[in-house]
Image (spheres, rainbow, N blue to C red):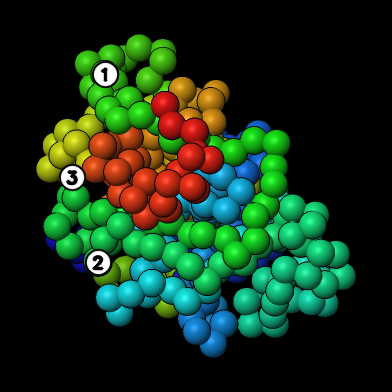
Amino acid sequence: MRRHLIALGAALTLLVAVAAPVGAITGNYRPDFEHPFEGLIAFYNSDWVFQQRCTGELLSPTVVLTAGHCVDNQQQGVQAHARIWLLQDVGSEFDGTTDPRTGYADSCSGTLGDGIADGWCAESSTMFNYGFDNFAGFPNIHDIGIVILDTPVYLDEYASLAGANTVDFLQSARGQSDTDLRVSGYGISYRLITPPRGPNAGNANNKVISFRVRLEADEHFVGLNGQYADGFSIKTEGNGNDRGGTCNGDSGGPMFYPATSNQVVAVVSWGINNAGCRGVGYYYRTDRADVLDWIEETVGPTLWSQITVG
C-alpha cells in the first residue's frame, strides 16, 4: 500500500525554482491574495540543514497548522527548526541573503528588514506531530502537525478551525453547487518529464517546476468514505474544467469550507502516485473531534483561547 501513496511535502532535490508562475497550484489556478495568514514553511534539522518544505497556516499569532508528515523527521521524532515566510510571492523576494543550496533566506532578518516586525517571516524550534508515521494505520494516518512560533506574528486575520463533523453532510449533498472546497499552497505547479520514457526509465529525468508562490484553486467534493478515506480524509477530484488540484509542497496547506471562508476543514495530505498531481487528492480532516481535542491539548489553554473554532 505505502509504495503507491505519496505525501505531498517537497524535498529539496525535487525542486527547480523559476521566477514566475505559468502553471498552477495545479490545473485551474489563480494567485492567492486572500489568505495572508498562510505561508511557505521550511523545516531543518538541529544543524539548520534544510530537510523539506510545506505549506502552513497561522491559527493565531504563534500557532501554525500543517501536515504531520511535514514536521516528522522520519526517525520517530519531529524536525528541530522551522522557518515560515508569510508572503504571497516567496520566490522572488530573496536576494544575497539566501542559502546558496536551498535558495531560501538563511534567517528572518537581512536586507529585506526585520522579518518579525514586518510580519513576513518567523522561526520555530517547537513542533508537534499528531502521530504520522509513514502511513502507519492507513487510512487513519494522523497527518496533522503543529508548529509554535518563537515570536508572535500579529495579523489582521487568521485561519479558523471548523467544528467537529462540519463536512459530514457533504456526503449526502454531492452534486449540489455548494460542495466545492478551496485549496491553497506553495507546491509545485507541474512536472517536466523528459526522455527516455518507458517502464525502466525511473525518475532520473522527472523534474518539477516550483514557483514558491501562494496559489489557490477550487476542487469538487467526491466523498468521505471508501477504503482510502474511511471518514478520516476528504476525497476530491482536481483539474479539468473549472477544477484545480494540489501537488508536492502544498502539504499542510488549508482546505477551506465554505470555499469563500477562512474556515479550515482539512489539510493537504497525500495523493496516489500515478495521479501525477493531476487527479484525485486526499485531505486529512481537521474537523474531527479527536483532532480538535489533540490540538487543544497540545497548544494548551492559553494558546487555544486565541484560536477560533466553529
Answer above or below: position of 236 versus 175. below
In the current view of this chain or complex, which residue is farthest to the front?
302
* Pair 2/3: label in front: 2
Packing grade of label 3 (10 A; few <14, some 14-19, many >=20) is some
Q: Which mark is residue 134?
A: 2
Badge 2 crowding class, 10 Å Cα cut-off, few under 14, some 14 to 19, many 20 or more, is some
Q: Quadrant of residue 123?
A: bottom right
Q: Mark 1 Cα within 10 Å, few/some/many (few <14, many 20+)?
A: few
Quadrant location of the N terminus? bottom left
Q: Position of residue 222 (x, y in %)?
A: 28, 29
Which residue is tagged 3? 228
- 265 or 19, which lies in front? 265
Mark 2 lies on a secondary structure that is loop
Q: Are marks 2 and 3 in contact (CB under 8 Å)?
A: no
Residue 190, horizontal then vertical, whole percent: 52, 54
How far apart are the alpha carbons under marks 2 and 1?
A: 30 Å
Up-down: is 105 above or below 248? Answer: below
Q: Nearer the viewer, residue 21 or 2?
A: 2
* Numbered circle sitting on residue 169: 1
Earlier-in-chain disc, 2 versus 3: 2
Residues 175 and 203: in front is: 175
Please indicate whether residue 11 sits to the left or right of residue 39 in the image.
Answer: left
Where residue 58 sits: x, y (%)? 56, 47
Identified at 12% across, 43% down, the residue is 227
Q: Amino acid at mark 1?
A: Phe
Mark 1–mark 3 Cα distance, whole angstroms, equals 19 Å
Q: Type of residue at label 2?
A: Asn
SS assignment at label 1: helix
Q: Residue at x 69, y 46 (%)?
A: 154
Mark 1 or mark 3: which is in front?
1
Say which element carries label 3: loop
x and y percentages locating residue 110 in the rendered image? 82, 72
